[in-house]
Every structure is written in C-alpha cells, then in structure tokens.
Amino acid sequence: MKKNFITSIICILMVSVFMVGCAHQEVIELKIGDYVQFGKYNDTPILWRVINIDTDGNPLLFSDRIISLKAFDAAGNYHSNDCRIGCGSNYWKNSNIRQWLNSDKKANTINWIQNPPTKENMFTGYSPYADEKGFLADGNFTENERNSINPIMHKSLLDNIDKDKKDGGESILTLASDIEEIVQNYDNAYYEMVEDKVFLLSLKELHDYVWENKNILRKEYYIGKPTKEAVDHSPEKNINLDCTHNWSNWLRTPAMTPSGPSFVRMVKSNGSIFDYFACFGGRGGVRPALFLNSSSIIFKSGSGVESDPYIVEGVPHNKKNNNFLIVNV
C-alpha cells in the first residue's frame, strides 16, 4: 500500500513538471523585434532578433550582430571563369560560406565541394576557415537545436553567367545602392530554388523584413555591428573594427554585370548597398539567418528584450524534421 502511494506521488509530480513546462511554452508568442538566444559561436551564446513570422507561426531569426569575418567564396581553379578563378564566385549554391553555415562537421572534416577557403585561396590570406568546424557542429549547436531549425526552400538570384541554372526569371537584377531601391526588378530577376537551414539574407529579405520593420527594429538595424568575439578573431586591423562601429556584411545576392561574376552584394558600414569580390575575407561580415520550427522549441527563460532574451532549446526528435517552407523572395 505504501509503495503504491509513493508511486502515485511520483507520477503526480512528473505530470506537474511536464504541465508547467508545456504551459511555459504555450504562453510565449514570439513577435517581430523579440530577442532570442539560440546556439553558440566562439563559445559565446548567439543573440538573434525575430524579423518575420511565417503563416505557420515559425519565426525567422536574424543574427543581432556580425558573428565572424569570412570570405563568401574562395578563389581557385575549380572555377572555369577567369574572374572567379582569381576572385571567387558569387554563386550562392556552391559558395563556401553556404556550405560552412549549413555544415555540422567537425574541424578538418568538411568535404568542400569546390576550392576550399584556405589561406592560399583568400585575398591577402585573410580569415581562412577551411579547417574550422561547421557552423552547426557540436559545441555550437546541440542535436536537438539543429533539429529545431526549419529547412527552407527559397529563391536565390543568379548572375547572368549562371542563368542556365535558372528556375525562373527574365532578366538580371538592376543594381541600386539605396536600401529603399534595391528590389526594383527583384521579382523578375533570374533565380533558382535552393534548400538551406542557415543562410545569408537576400536583398529582398533585408528590405522587406528588416528595413520595412525599421520602426520596430531601429532605422539602422539593417547595418551590422560585429561582436567582440568577431573582432578578437579577425586578422583585420582597422580603427573602425570594434563593437561600437558598423561593419560591412555579406548578403547572398550576386551583383550582376558590369561588376562581374565574382562580386556579391553587401551592406556597407555607411548603410549603402555595394559590391565586393567573393574571396575577400577581411571585409566580409557574416550575419546569418534561420527559421525555427515553432513546434520544436522550448523557452527556458527570458522576456524577449535585449537584456533578457528568450533562451531557446530544442526538443528531442525521433526522426529528421522534413517540414519545408516555401518563401517567395
């Protein structure tokens, strides 16, 4: 009798703990502008900002700051175009930065699909990352956290040289330097559909989700500032490279002719949108984005403000999450 009583008490306590956890998860509804802590990089928790919520309630997180300075893509003979051989490629799908952002491999084990981002393949040797572990690797993200990231199938624009790979579009993108004008003919530009878990923002995502939400996020929020760790780990020596100054960061959109097939669109420190060649690692800030699966996260604590962000952890999955999003941007 006594044994049954103790067993009943334990069961009641377990149910109570479970209900409290579920209730805590249910009462939080993320909104644009909320701060979220999720994963780590350089042994430091990553702070994100919610910049969009899709129709299924899944939040799009955008790194609050530039987390690293890296080249978009390496130079080398894998490329067939002379410009790309010397300066890297602006083709997102095969880029080193895309492969690194989506990799969960250990250090020195990433099987690079093209020229590896070694010192020899970087302009002036800045910021090689060929031997670094993948962004999603253990130590940065747990398996449960990785399972909580929603894969997305989305548009990635193409340079004129790559238009044979297109899934749609009728022309090259019109270049503009003003944040308000960067999507002039975006919807008609050459593109292909690419699947990512982690990605850099496109011009349209930057415009529609960050710039257009400036009243919530802040007018200059689309311009990145580096973390202390990004500054400490960078070989770039510049008086303006510190946590208080804006710094340039990559987008995933290529810069079309006449720049050439090595040039990628970037957000410059002064807020203008400009182009830089892909293998320059010392100047290119990395400010990633990802979608969380709202049904696969638990909020451990926090109130959603910068000083007290929601702290998120993933929940165990028995199988891989195959819920793909389609985003028409």
Image (spheres, rainbow, N blue to C red):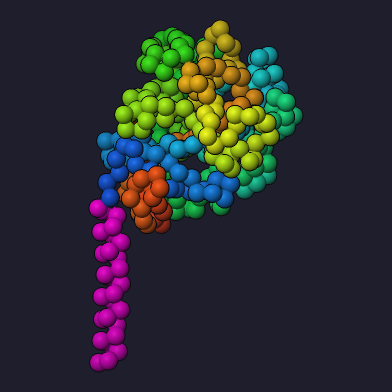
| Picture residue at 30% right of the left edge, 79% below the top | 10
Q: Position of residue 14 (x, y in %)?
A: 30, 72
Q: Is residue 78 above or below residue 106?
A: above
- Residue 22 magenta-drawn? yes
| Picture residue at 65% right of the left edge, 29% below the top | 238
Magenta portion: prevailing SS class: helix
Q: Position of residue 35 (x, y in %)?
A: 38, 43
Q: Position of residue 37 (x, y in %)?
A: 43, 48
- Residue 185 magenta-drawn? no
Quadrant into which the N terminus falls: bottom left
Quadrant into which the C terminus falls: top left
Res 104 visible: no
| Residue with the most extreme top position | 258
Q: Is residue 291 left or right of residue 234?
A: left
Q: Is residue 239 left or right of residue 197?
A: right
| Picture residue at 64% right of the left edge, 22% below the top | 88
Q: Quadrant of residue 207?
A: top left
Q: Position of residue 50 (x, y in %)?
A: 36, 38
Q: Nearer the viewer, residue 269 or 320?
A: 269
Which region shows up in magenta?
1-27
| Picture residue at 45% right of the left edge, 44% below the top | 47
Q: Is residue 72 above or below residue 186?
A: below
Count the labels in the image.
0
